[in-house]
Amino acid sequence: MPDALQLLKTRRSVKPMELSGPGPSREDIDTLLAIASRVPDHGKLAPWRFIVFEGEARLAAGEIIAAAFAADRADATADQLDFERKRLSRAPLVIAVVSRAAPHVKIPVWEQELSAGAAAMNLVLAAHALGYAASWITEWYAYDRRVLDKLGLAANERIAGFVHIGRAGKPPEDRDRPKLESIVTHFSAAGSA
């Protein structure tokens, strides 16, 4: 068990532009997705799914992103469009975690959305466990309905995150974390926290 705790203590996000190849193998991708799907899921609804972007598909998705960007910005420069076009090709592998939460007679939508977030976090942790680095981000295009429609999301689906996976060029630096005393309270028998 200490190895698992050390893994959790050492996980760090790495910016997508700092990720390089080689990316995960087909077997590693299957492992990543299997682990990502092992999350709390009240009612066994699987209120999430995954879209895998690798190889040329990353650039094809980038064309969709760049087109939406250009449609809103007539003055967009060639450099800006190129940047948008490469959004999903900064890392060797990008996996979108799609929340497909929907009204249910018993399970609140909020619980379903949290399950999608847990799937994204499991994906990040699995990448770290396999020796890769990852970054879970959304960015503007995760909220643009034109982009989502062209990526194949249904009207009720949303992006919980794009998880960029690759190899870190250098060990990631740690960042300040909140002090436990500033984020933890203990409820007492007297009823106050």
Image (spheres, rainbow, N blue to C red):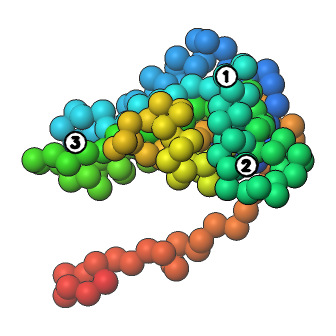
Q: Which mark is residue 70?
A: 2
What residue does disc 1 label?
57
Q: Which quadrant of the figure has residue 83?
A: top right
Q: Quadrant of residue 157?
A: top left
Residue 112 position (above or below residue 126): below
Q: CA distance from mark 3 to mark 2?
A: 41 Å
* Circle 1 Cα neighbour tier, 10 Å, few/some/many (<14 / 14–19 / ≥20): some
Local packing at callout 3 (Cα closer than 10 Å; few below 14, some 14-19, many 20+) is some
- Relative to 38, does residue 83 appear above or below in the rendering? below
- Asked whether disc 1 touches disc 2, contact meaning CB atoms under 8 Å apart, the reply is no
Q: Which residue is mark 3?
A: 42
Q: Is residue 7 among the parts visible in the rendering?
A: no
Furthest residue in direction left, as rendered? 105
Tell me the amino acid under the disc marked 2: Ala
Q: Nearer the viewer, mark 3 or mark 1?
A: 1
Separation of residues labelled 3 and 1 (CA atoms): 33 Å
